[in-house]
Image (cartoon, coloured by chain):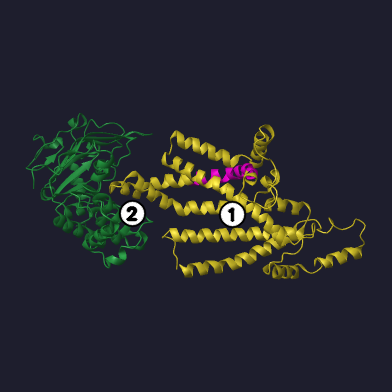
Amino acid sequence: MLVYLLRRLLYVCPVAIGVSAICFMLVHVAPGDPLTAIMAVDATAQEQEAMRAAYGLDKPLPTQYVIWLGKAVQGDLGKSIASGRPVAGEVIGAVQNSLVLAFAASLIAFPLGIFLGFLAGYFRDSWIDRAVTTVAIAGVSLPNYWLGIVLVIIFSVTLGWLPAMGAGDGAWMWDFTHLSHIILPAITLSVVPIGIVARTMRALVGEIYSMDFVQALYAKGLHRGDVLRHVVRNAAPTGLSVMGIQLGYLLGGSILIETVFNWPGTGFLLSNAIFQRDLPLLQGTILVLALFFVLVNLTVDVAQAIIDPRIKRS
Amino acid sequence: MTDTPLLEISDLNVRFDGERTVHAINGLNLSLGQGEMLGLLGESGSGKSVTLKALLRLLPPKRTQIDGSIRVNGADIMTLSGRRLSSYRGGEVSMVFQEPALALDPVYTIGDQIAETVMRHRGIGRKAAMEVALDMLMKVRIPSPERRLKNYPHEMSGGMRQRAMIALALSCRPKLLLADEPTTALDATVQIQILLLLRELQREFGMGIIFVTHDIGVAVEISERVAIMYAGNIVEEGSTRDIIRDARHPYTRGLLSANLHNVAKGTRLEAIAGAPPSLETEPVTCQFAPRCPNALPACEKGLPPFFVPGPGRRVACLLENGATAD
């Protein structure tokens, strides 16, 4: 198991380096000069050059990448062009907010998705199954920013029960005001993962129940509950990996939903960085998100290896 | 041997309703004495496996119509439900499946799977149940049983898995073992080992076995009595000796001659022409008649009754009716 863990960690290194290179290049390939936003309109060619040199943008791309990577490893992602504040601090603040939102959304999505999926898989082809499938397809195909707007119109504008914007004042705390801010965005964000998890679990549970060994379990005299335990254990590895991937998406924050709710997370930060052509901020945010995704995948793989004996560990 | 037969099936009918109706079992009668080994022989779709599943009440209740009676040691099992059904399954009657790789849960160890059954049926603790499991693995002669107890099914070979499956099925000392083509998925050499093991365990435990197979050689090898199924009913039954020496039903003869033993190279292999019926409607005539080389006009007019050509034998064929028998 330890060997497996070390080997998996080792594999992460090239992936992380590749990810960082792509993050860096992608932003440079995009059109538009990052400095036009902050430079005076009448700046001379000389002044432009000086500015370029100040941000290190005059050097060749590979050199820029190496310098950027060297600093990034030490936790320095440069300074935001728009605000002048260190990128690392901005990203960490945003990641915290997105994490809280992702956590809240998974708390809604995973139990509900698993429950609905199990129900549908167990009562395959019954009206329950059809109802769950309909809900799941609706969840996956509804544009969630639209749902967010509709929820705001109902619960904030018409009924006035919940706040429509922001994450509440000050740092995040698990108190009433902050929770009231998170309810609507968390529900909105949970709809797609509910659909995906429910559909996956339905297919998985239905498939496992139709396997020969389930009949063999009944044949040896086990009760319904015992058989359910076996089914859960068989469904766990795949279910876990689907939820891991969903969690990865949630952690990335949703640009659309965070924009609709003005939620100060990574999605919100990204959209600001894009509109302001804030190159260092954009690179830093994408890098942190990508590494997060790699980390989540690693965790899921390791967890899967622990619960599924068929995965070779050595 | 006691007076009550171990198993008595009378007038069993099984019909599957769905997109297509299938009359899988049609008026089947079968009985088995205590400690007897019966070979149930037939080709795919003849209803062998359905019979076994009906015996364990494993057929999906929603899509299946079952009537008739099944008695095990005199007790009616068609009315069992809930806890009593669970304790009957695996306790009194248990089953060895065709494909051990599919019939064992892939994410539980062999030891856990056996112990779980023992705990359910005997109400003993996990530790004691594990000891029973170990004892069973020794009985089926799995090498280094302590280690195998902690193995997952995928870590074992096919023959080993089938041994483990047998250990599992016998762990609660059933009176009747249903073996659903237990050697079909195995290599020929392993097949024989498993057959010998089953025969030995049968003697040791004194249980009755219904051994389902489509391989007449296997049936002859292992059983004292053979019943041949066709289109959801038995067409001939008798002691293995009698059937081999003097098969009466044309289908049984066909099966015997479709065998590869003693066939010289270059000669044409004998096969039964045609295909089994689809059983979409309830059979009212002899279902073998369309493929039968000796069919009479009367065969297409009604179901043939059973004739008794000798003690312990029965044949459902009009050719036995004296007139045309030679």
In the picture of the structure, the residue carrying the numbered disc 2 is B104
Q: Position of residue A219 (x, y in %)?
A: 28, 47
Label for residue A248?
Answer: 1
Left or right of B181, for residue A64: right
Residue at x 50% of width, y 67% of height:
A5
Name which residue type carries label 1. Answer: Gly
Q: Which chain identifier belongs to the green chain? A: B
| Horizontal relation, residue B49 to residue B323: left or right | right
Instruction: Give the magenta range.
Output: A180-200
Q: Residue B115 appears in which quarter of the rendering?
A: bottom left
The quadrant the N terminus of chain A occupies is bottom left
Q: Are marks 2 and 1 on the same chain?
A: no
Task: Bin the neighbour count of mark 2 within 10 Å (Cα to Cα): few under 14, some 14-19, many 20 and up.
Answer: many
Q: Chain of mark 2?
A: B
Q: Colour of chain A?
A: yellow
Q: Secondary structure at mark 1?
A: helix
Front: mark 2 or 1: 1
Q: Are marks 2 and 1 in contact (CB under 8 Å)?
A: no
Q: Which quarter of the figure has residue A26?
A: bottom right
Whether residue B10 is visible: yes
- Which dot marks residue B117? none
Give percent across and percent down for residue B231: 25, 39
